[in-house]
């Protein structure tokens, strides 16, 4: 049996999921969790991160510099979680650990998008049309 994913949106889908569970081989695993972020949310977030990365400077190693959109994501996800995770690198230096947005729920991603917009607005970011929203 291949992997099966059921988006629980109707009684019929729930019955199909129950049937798949009842007929799955021993040792298979069932997980029920909230839906993860959508591709539209992901695209929207990356547009926002790109705008911030082009317009806002951050203090890095004591200097005020522009950083990549990926680094902005690391900074903002740490802010969303209100925690900074660090690991000791193989050369003895410190490595900051970011969070994967692909594992975020729709609600968590919405919170990150709201935080990113608020952060950019506080710093006078001029948003590109794709960063202004729409149906996500």
Image (cartoon, helix red, strand yellow):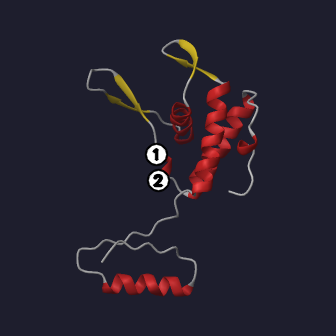
Label 1 sits on a secondary structure element that is loop
Q: In the rendering, which numbered label is found on residue 34?
A: none
Image quarter of the N terminus: bottom left
Whether residue 37 sits left or right of residue 15 in the image: it is right
- The residue carrying mark 1 is 100
Task: Using the numbered discs, state the Cα–Cα distance from disc 2 to disc 1 in whole angstroms.
Answer: 6 Å
Q: Position of residue 121 (x, y in %)?
A: 74, 33
- Which residue is rendered at x = 49% and y = 83% of the image? 14
- Which residue is rendered at x = 74% and y = 36% of the image? 127
Label 2 sits on a secondary structure element that is helix
Q: Position of residue 136 (x, y in %)?
A: 68, 56
The one nearer the camera, 22 or 125, is: 125
Q: Are marks 2 and 1 in contact (CB under 8 Å)?
A: yes
Residue furthest top as drawn: 63
Q: In the rendering, which numbered label is found on residue 103?
A: 2
User: Is 68 placed above or below 8 here?
Assistant: above
Q: Position of residue 111 (x, y in %)?
A: 62, 48
Q: How many marks?
A: 2
Crowd tier of the residue under label 1, counting other residues whose Cα lies within 10 Å: few below 14, some 14–19, many 20 or above = few
Residue furthest front as drawn: 129
Q: Position of residue 88 (x, y in %)?
A: 30, 27
User: Is 22 placed above or below 94 here?
Assistant: below
Crowd tier of the residue under label 2, counting other residues whose Cα lies within 10 Å: few below 14, some 14–19, many 20 or above = few
Whether residue 106 sits left or right of residue 33 in the image: it is right
């Amino acid at each position: 049996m291949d992997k099966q994913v059921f988006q629980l949106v109707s009684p019929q889908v729930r019955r199909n999921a129950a049937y798949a569970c009842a007929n799955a081989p021993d040792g298979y695993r069932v997980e029920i969790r909230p839906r993860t972020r959508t591709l539209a949310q992901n695209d929207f977030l990356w547009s926002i991160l790109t705008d911030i990365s082009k317009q806002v400077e951050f203090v890095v190693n004591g200097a005020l510099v522009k950083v990549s959109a990926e680094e902005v994501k690391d900074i903002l996800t740490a802010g969303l979680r209100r925690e900074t995770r660090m690991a000791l690198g193989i050369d003895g230096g410190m490595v900051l650990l970011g969070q994967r947005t692909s594992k975020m729920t729709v609600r968590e991603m919405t919170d990150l998008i709201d935080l990113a917009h608020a952060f950019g607005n506080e710093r006078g970011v001029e948003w590109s049309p794709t960063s202004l929203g729409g149906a996500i």
